[in-house]
Amino acid sequence: MTPVYILSGFLGSGKTTLLQRLITHWQGQGLRPAIVMNEIGDVNLDGLLVSTEVPMAEMLGGCICCTIRGDLSIQLAELIEQEHPDLIVIEATGAGNPLEIFDAVTEVSLYMKLDLKPMITVVDALHLADLHASQQGKTYRLMIEQIRCGSVLVLNKLDLIDVERQQELTEFLQHTNSFARIIPAVKCEVDVAGLLEGDGARSSLMGETAAVHGESPQEKQAHQEEEPHVCHSGCQDHEHHHHHDDERHKHHHSGGHHEPNHAHASHEHVTVYTHYFHGPIDSTEFERFIAELPREVYRGKGILRFSDTSSRFLFQYAYRESDYLKVTPQKDVPDVAVFIGEHFDRSRIAQRLEEMEQKQRDLA
């Protein structure tokens, strides 16, 4: 049987960073992992951060849990038959409902020999802390569903909130999903062996929280191990809306070509804008543009050229934090930027980027 891990978490929470650490761990054990990477947009930029030695199937332009659900069995079958991996990791899109993704994988396991492992969910501490203050909105409800359906919760980006809020969030996670192990992290630096085996010591944050509730960490862990983990989110009541935009090529695979699937759709409350650049732009203007993105844009990523340097850069934006990495793509990747969020004005984003491109053309 092929072990299958599902990696869940909201947009920009740090899933790909954790994925890299998992791959390094498995490779260090002499194992051959493979990846199914699901993006609700049309471009897989996170895949550039993963070694080309790792077999990868890309499921683009939709979510496993609805519009491209049927493609999952094809992708898993081809990975297993062509690459013979020791295990597979499915990195779900951050906009996906975790229980429905879990359900889609379970369907495949009915006719393929898959060993479905407990779900790992990465939680963005800063983003959750801000949304928890109001406790409303579709994004907040989706994050709660992801938390409730995880067997292991990696509470990431703790360096961005103070100690008091760290404790508050840890108690909130414990209350929301008392069956999950909670692992505190900064940049997803975790004990991977302990995360996977489930026998690592409880975190110090959890120990403090258990003490507040009158239980020792050992008692708390014993209590949680009495029953198997189940999802208490009421996810089955989740209304999963989608709408059809235009025709997109749904997925690609490094081992061959597939026919396009022309049923592109997205979650109704999720807005995606993809911008293809025709040339370099000014780095200072682009950084200013990123800093001024509306709060409704949760995630941004892309690869582009700047007029003041000959290098190409991979940029990452997640909830008001941005990062730039000099890259040399191993495959043909266009200059492109993808922005994902909730009901933001795509036309304004497009206008700003087009103005930057036009300015460079005028200077040239």
Image (cartoon, rainbow, N blue to C red):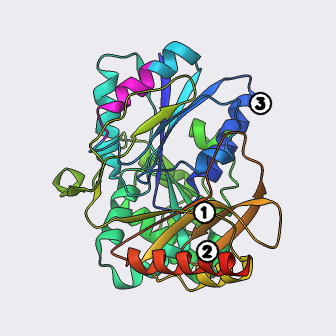
- Label 2, on which residue? 357
Q: Residue at x 25, y 63 (%)?
A: 268
On screen, residue 33 above or below 160: above
Q: Are marks 1 and 2 in contact (CB under 8 Å)?
A: yes
Regarding mark 1 in the picture, which secondary structure is present there?
A: loop
- Label 1, on which residue? 278
Mark closest to the chain's N terminus, 1 or 2 = 1
C-alpha gap between disc 1 and disc 3 = 41 Å
On screen, residue 212 above or below 107: below
- Label 3, on which residue? 28
Regarding mark 3 in the picture, which secondary structure is present there?
A: helix
C-alpha gap between disc 3 and disc 2 = 44 Å
Magenta-tinted stretch: 68-77
**What is the x, y in percent for residue 66?**
26, 45
Viewer-nearest residue: 33 or 301: 301
Q: Is residue 190 left or right of residue 211?
A: right
Amino acid type indicated by mark 1: His
